[in-house]
Image (cartoon, grey):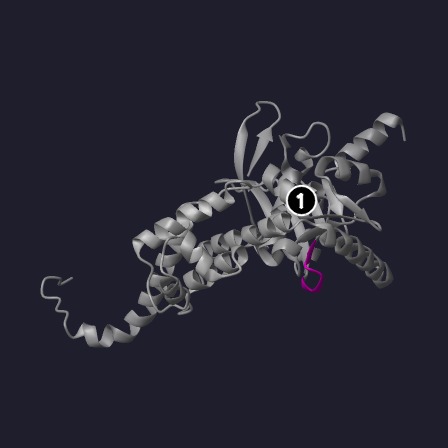
Amino acid sequence: MYIVDKKSDQKDQIEIVPIELDDLKRVPKSKFWFDWREEINYDVFKLQISGTDEILGLISMETHHQDSRLEIRLLAASKENRGKNKKFDRLVGNLIAFACIRSITMFGSLACVSLVPKTRLIDHYREEYSMIEAGKSLFLDGKELLEIIKRFGDE
Amino acid sequence: MSKKGFNNEIEEYKELIDSRLTSEKEKEQERNALIAARQKRFRERPESEKLVGNLLQIKYQIENYLNNPAYSNKNSFPKFLSMYVDTLYKKRKDFASDLDINPIILSQIINNHRDPKEEFLIRLIVHSQAVFKSFGHFDRDLWPKLYYQDKMCEFLTTSEKRRKIEERHVNNKVVDI
């Protein structure tokens, strides 16, 4: 997986690895929007450029085994990587693809990733990630989920 | 808020997701909506798509196992091999035929009664790479790494038991630190 530096167009390989307790001091609300200490009972992963330790993005997930579904509870790019002037592209796509790979690993053909978006962003997620609507939720499964893995993952 | 301010806020929120729901009633409603939508899609999904999902599951599970090997005397190579064969074929003898090997030998490998020969491993790699070619890739070292990982686990488990016996044969006449 890689991210793209918007200024130089340079591609940097990334890794998404479990967050450690010490990392929680390095992800303040001012930089990562949410209080990530509250997510300690869920699966929280950090995205960083391979070989570096600067955290660029975070994702918290809950596995619903009974439903063969993985829910993205929280996701945040760092402050410098949000909005029009963000430094890197593909951060969110990589984190969503990571959730898709994790879901496939657990559930195979039944894999599903869901989230509840802000109403104003429904169209964005539908267009950018081909997500499907159900109630207030959006989800990926089947072909759409495989396509996200192909686009952002290593397939 | 001005239109520009509104657009900037929307741009920033694209990199933020908060799915946390507080009410149990709402959680249940969302769960039911998701189940209904997914069931309909699953019924209409082509078998080929389901197959890709199940094959990727095997590949990712092998990769996860190799990245975080759990040392035990359980053999993972036969387990993943049987998953691979059973995902692709209704009858194991058809896989044996595609690899031009005796079905009895395949059965012995899957049941951990025989070690695979080098030629079997190479044919398995060729087969897996051909299967994955249309939708992804399959590293040529996955199966061999898995097999040798098992061998290392076996060695670490059994060598500890034999150590006391073998220690009697070792003299450290040269090393005197």
Judge whether B175 appears above or below B122 on screen.
below
Q: In the depicted view, which residue is nearer to us: A143 or B154?
A: A143
Q: How many marks?
A: 1
Left or right: where A124 falls relative to B70: right
- A67 in magenta: yes
> Which residue is pictured at 63% across the width and 44% down the height?
A146
Which range of residues does the magenta coloring cover? A65-70
- A21 in magenta: no
Left or right: where A26 falls relative to B166: right
Check the image and name the residue furthest to the right.
B1
Q: What amino acid type is highlighted by mark number 1?
A: Lys
Residue B160 placement (x, y as % from top left): 30, 72
Q: In the depicted view, which residue is nearer to us: A140 or B152?
A: A140
Q: Which residue is mark 1?
A: A143
Q: Secondary structure at mark 1?
A: helix
Q: Is residue B78 visible?
A: yes
Q: Quadrant of the C terminus of chain B?
A: bottom left
Check the image and name the residue furthest to the top.
A8
Residue A79 placement (x, y as % from top left): 69, 37
Residue A69 placement (x, y as % from top left): 69, 57
Q: Disc 1 sits on a residue from what chain?
A: A
Q: Which class describes the residues within 10 Å of circle 1: few (<14), some (14-19), or many (20+)?
A: some
